[in-house]
Amino acid sequence: MLTRHTVATRMITNAMHLHLCLTLRLMLSLCLLFHTSGLQADQPPQQTRPSISSEALRTARAGTAATAAAPRALPRRARYVLIVSEDGMHPALIREQPLPNHERLYKNGAYSFRARTISTASTLPSHASMLSGVDSHEHGLRWNNWRPERGYIRAPTVFSLATQEGLSTSAIVGKFKLRHILPQGTVETFVRPGYYCRKVSEEAARRIEADQPTLMFVHFSDPDEKGHSAGWLSDAQRAAARECDRCLGTLLEALDRRGTLHETLIIVSADHGGHSHGHSGILLSDLQIPWIAHGPKVRRGYAISGRVSTMDTAATVLFALGLQAPTNLRGRPVHEIFARSGEAEARP
Ligand SMILES: [Zn+2]
């Protein structure tokens, strides 16, 4: 039989348990509420005519949000990455004539001459996909000229993500409209030394030799220019491809002189091919692009068997630099270019 004192003690104990449970529930609810509102606050904001600097901050934040869930450091496979985009370079322009510097890279590296750009096969949307790893409806750049009033890319790029991690970055381009992809704050230097590849490559080489950035983008206009004026795969465009080969040689010589060729993952690709005097994206000839990779741990003389998309360039660059990819990335790292232990690697 329970005494009156025992009953009172049990009632007090039960009341304390109830109070403790309610307190814990309240704390849990508050935690969930705080966490949910935090996620909402991290969503990339809608873009309405931002200034360059505010847009740069937004892009950088988008990159931060996408990488915030990465608790562990990823392995890094290359000390440097150099992306070379040859505007309008149809794969046949490389395969059907001697181009010694391109050959040096693909015969000692991995390559595909049937890679594809996105269906919006024009310069600005395609390059945006190359550097962001998402299609045009996601990155938002669906026009093809310099229209600052329309704002900047809506997706993180390899440059905004690298900059966010404190890596040095540089873009040397032949067309200023590419600024839509690389607004101020997402890349350390963005310069347009001239339209054609000679001045672009000389400026890029100078910067490589002075202080090679960890991530560099170099853009050559020549094949696109001659494609529009003289026709795709015309003699004039084949000559423009040979000029691009000399410009690529200028970059390789700079890496040789700096002694970093063996530490640099080089990806040579294009934004689109073309037919007749344009590249509407209707024909396969418009969509096919070269994709050549050369550098540390890259297989030697390896023909890539899988389908490569231009969006895979961004994914492969992030993979090589050990940067966490955004969860919505459409591109995938081209894993098959990397040698397994014991296999032949690219040789400078
Ligand atoms: Zn183009």
Image (tube, rainbow, N blue to C red):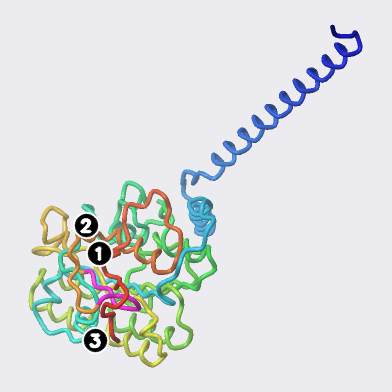
Q: Is residue 179 magenta?
A: no
Residue holding disc 3: 246
171 relative to 60 in the view: left or right? left
Region of the chain picked out in magenta, as a range:
291-299
- Mark found first going from the N terminus, 2 or 3: 2
Q: Are marks 1 and 2 in contact (CB under 8 Å)?
A: yes
Residue type at the position of mark 1: Asp
Residue type at the position of mark 2: Ala
Residue holding disc 2: 121
Q: Is mark 1 within 8 Å of ligand 1?
A: yes
- Mark found first going from the N terminus, 1 or 2: 2
Residue 327's label in the rendered image is none
Q: Using a 10 Å C-alpha cutoff, classify the residue at mark 3 as few (fewer than 14 neighbours), some (14 to 19) or many (20 or more).
A: some
Residue type at the position of mark 3: Arg
Which residue does the image show at 21% across and 57% down from the upper left?
A: 121
Image x and y of residue 331, in percent: 31, 56
Q: Residue furthest bottom?
A: 257
Ligand 1 rendered quadrant: bottom left
Residue holding disc 1: 271
